[in-house]
Amino acid sequence: MRIGLIYDTFDAYPWADDDPPDADAEYEPEETVDALAETVRYMGHTPVRVGTAFDLRETLHDGLSLDAAINISEGAHSRNREAYAPILLEMAGIPCLGSDALTLSVTLDKAWTKDLVSAADVPTPPHRVFSDKTEVDADNLPPFPLFVKPRYEGTSKGITPQSRVETVEALRTEVERVTATYEQDAVVETFVEGGGEFTVAVVGHDPPEALPVLQRAVEPSTGIGLHALEHRGAPSADADWDYDLGGTLAPALEDRLQTLALRVFETLDCRDFARADFRVDADGQPWFLEVNPLPTFAPDDTFAIIAELMGREYVDYLAEVFEQGLRRLDLTDPSS
């Protein structure tokens, strides 16, 4: 089959001087695209490097022919941006691995996502949404410390050491920074302390499978996940951070995190692959933070680390994940 690769590299979009400094943080290095192409070839198919959703639109107009596509495109400049590629593929009748446009749009909205998973009995920190600092009511806030982040962003965009706030005055300052810099609402939630930060990848379907839980290092003075402070474009990305990885992950906690990740995956109708992030409090209670149905497949990130833990070659393991997606789409020989 001809399998299209839909993706955004760091140089894919022109940015204006007044765009956020981390505007391109969600995008991928060429090494990720190379890994996807190598995996498709390993599966016995032909990779077709399409590029962004905007490139997809143009090449479809010019007669692009694909049997299927793997979409990791984040899009740009809109809260609907993650839906661009899957909608175009759907309109063109091209089957696509990964979640569809509705799931991608809903999960990019951190506030809606929290409401939906909370209704499915997944614990998530209490939160508020503010479009301006003047909306902050000191008498109607979740318990401090609080954490402030943009409503419609991923890859830790907008996160700095100051994102954790201890006072109403600091909260208003951070809400003003986020709403002005990112031109969107700020989500404010209780900052969960005491038990560390974890990410859980989920793959497959009928039923999906939660992969081994990965614990993330945190910066000791703030407790913020180190990955959130080191991301591309962050003012503190080049800092020489100390970090704390916490203790050994207890089997009971890993089971609980995997159970909750699967519930999130199914509640939001994710498909084929996703990653859910959690923090754990001092009593061992996990709290859901957010889910990413467009996780990176970079050769040094979550899925590559999990493959290494399993003693698998990365391309071989990634091929297995994608083959499951092709089976869901009924694009493989059931006897293979």
Image (spheres, grey):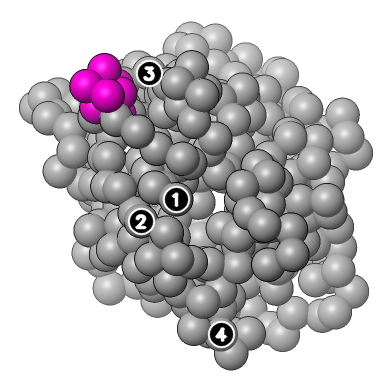
Q: Position of residue 269 (x, y in %)?
A: 74, 35
| Quadrant of residue 195 within the rendered picture | bottom right
Q: Nearer the viewer, residue 142 or 208?
A: 208
Residue shown at the point (35%, 56%) measured from the top left: 46
Residue 97 lies in the magenta-colored region: no
Q: Please identify the dominant SS of the magenta region.
A: helix
Mark 2–mark 3 contact, CB under 8 Å? no
In the picture of the structure, the residue carrying the numbered disc 2 is 46
The correct choice, above or below, for 167 with respect to 235 in the image is above
In the picture of the structure, the residue carrying the numbered disc 1 is 1
Mark 1–mark 2 contact, CB under 8 Å? yes
Mark nearest the camera among 2 and 3 is: 2
**Badge 3: residue crowd in 10 Å (few <14, some 14–19, many ≥20):** few
The amino acid type, in three-letter code, at marker 1 is Met
| Quadrant of residue 293 within the rendered picture | top right
The correct choice, above or below, for 304 with respect to 282 in the image is below
Residue shown at the point (74%, 65%) measured from the top left: 335
CA gap, disc 4 and disc 2: 23 Å
CA gap, disc 2 and disc 3: 32 Å
CA gap, disc 4 and disc 1: 25 Å
Q: Which stretch did the figure color magenta? A: 56-63
The amino acid type, in three-letter code, at marker 4 is Arg
Mark nearest the camera among 4 and 2 is: 2
Secondary structure under badge 4?
loop
Q: Earlier in the sequence, mark 4 or mark 3?
A: 3
Q: Earlier in the sequence, mark 4 or mark 1?
A: 1
Task: Tell me, yes or no, if residue 292 can be seen here.
Answer: yes
Mark nearest the camera among 4 and 1 is: 1
Which quarter of the rendered picture does the C terminus lie within?
bottom right
Disc assigned to residue 78: 3
Q: Nearer the viewer, residue 214 or 170?
A: 214
